[in-house]
Amino acid sequence: MCSDYAVVMFRTWRGNVRSRGRVHAGEPGVVFCNTPGEVMIANPHQAPGSFSVLELESSVLEQWIAEMPKEPQAVQSTRK
């Protein structure tokens, strides 16, 4: 169980992943996002594999979101 937000990206790992009450196929290129306290159970297929995890500390992520503009910024064209 992760105590922070996390992004999990499967590189060579393959198997079934149970998350939020559903079973998903985990395979290279698939990405899962976890919220704090969420449990993800992964059962690999026959061969071992690799994956990467990027954890985002909750307080830092919340501060970053609070600093974002409340309204979308207008995009101005530089063409004349």
Image: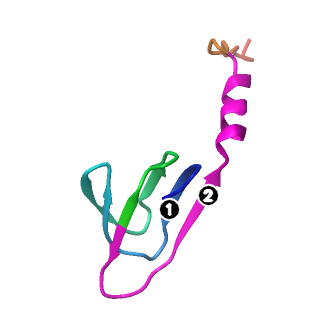
Give the side of residue 52 with respect to residue 33, left or right.
right
Q: Earlier in the sequence, mark 1 or mark 2?
A: 1
Q: Residue at x 70, y 14 (%)?
A: 76
- Residue sitting farthest toward the bottom: 47
Give the side of residue 53 with respect to residue 78, left or right.
left
Tag 1–tag 2 contact (CB < 8 Å): yes
- What kind of element bears circle 1? strand
Task: Using the rendered view, name the quadrant where residue 13 is placed.
Answer: bottom left
**Separation of disc 1 and disc 2 at Cα?**
9 Å
Q: Residue at x 45, y 76 (%)?
A: 12
Which stretch is magenta?
42-69
Mark 2 residue crowding within 10 angstroms, few (<14) / some (14–19) / many (20+) = few
Q: Which residue is mark 2?
A: 54
Instruction: Name which residue type carries label 2.
Output: Leu
Along the line of sight, the residue nearer the viewer: 70 or 18: 18
Q: Which residue is mark 1?
A: 9
Task: Using the rendered view, name the quadrant where residue 77 is placed.
Answer: top right
Number of marks in the image? 2
Q: Does the magenta run of residues contain 47? A: yes
